Amino acid sequence: MDFDADIMADFLTESGELLEQLDTDLVSLESTPGDEDLLNQIFRAIHTIKGSASFLGLANLVDCAHAAEDILNAARRDELRVDRRSMDLLLDATAVLRMQFSEIKAGQELTQARRDIIAERGYADMDACYITPFITSIQNVFGTMLQLSVQRRDPSIKSDDAPSYDVSGIISLSGDVDGSTVLSMPMETALRVVSLFTGTECEADNPDFPDAIGELLNMITGNAKAGFEGRKVTLSCPNVIIGKNHHVARLSDVPSILIPFETDCGEINLEISIQDRKAMGGTVVAQAA
């Protein structure tokens, strides 16, 4: 540590007091997840710790605090619910911060934040301008074209390229953004949805079946991109894959947000993996195993 011992001691004292209060506040937040004042108080404490650690060049501590801060910020914007999973990650993050404080006192290298804590930042890092338009669009498209109510459930980070269900429609996005959207559903749900969309019974081996899935995803993605303010976006033609062993490879280092929906026809998943083009590099490939 190159900083004056007094400066580091002040940091450990002041931030340590904030960390102690965080333990109490997080327990309270778990009981009252809708308390906005408490949520803001916790956010400010984490933000202060992160800012001080950044000034002192404590990179691993900054990463951990930043991850917790982003989870809290997403909750403050109503983009993430304060549930059991997010609370566990916040409590784990503060546990890592306490360990790092002890390591600073002992003059040791700082422990890195666990990968799952860092990964949760993906939801917050993916700007709300990408997520919200898709939620609105799928509700509008299914409501207008199918007269089907769509209820959103809690989103999560998708950690692999395995399909959610048997039928997946994929569209790639390019231009000012890179990424993909995937509409995935069980075969039984897909058959019901296509029948409503086409107005007739349609089996999976009918050429109209994948066309209908692709057209629905095209409408959802096309309507959603209109909400990408200030960005010019081009959509690929939909690619529909049917079967249990297909995979969707995505851009590296870009989180995939899985948003589940419930309908009278069954469950439907929308997977969104999008970020500004300047922030990333890679390709999106859909493939059948």
Image (cartoon, helix red, strand yellow):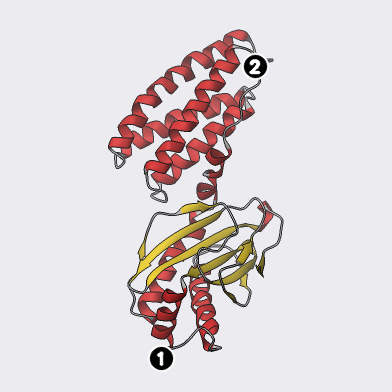
* Mark 1 and mark 2 residues within 8 Å of each other at the beta carbon: no
Q: Secondary structure at mark 2?
A: loop
Q: Residue at x 64, y 13 (%)?
A: 107
Q: Is residue 240 above or below residue 231?
A: below
| Residue 219 image point, x, y percent | 49, 77
Q: Amino acid at mark 2?
A: Gln
Q: Nearer the viewer, residue 1 or 257?
A: 257
Q: Residues within 10 Å of mark 2 (few under 14, many from 20)?
A: few
Which numbered mark, 1 or 2, is in the foreground of this view?
1
Q: Which residue is mark 2?
A: 108
- Is 288 drawn above or below residue 34 in the view shown? below
Residue that extends furthest to the front in the rendered view of this protein? 244
Residue visible at 49% across and 36% down in the picture = 68
The correct choice, above or below, for 32 with respect to 164 in the image is: above
- x and y percentages locating residue 31 in the rendered image: 28, 36
Residue on which disc 1 sits = 200
- Above/below status of 28 relative to 36: above
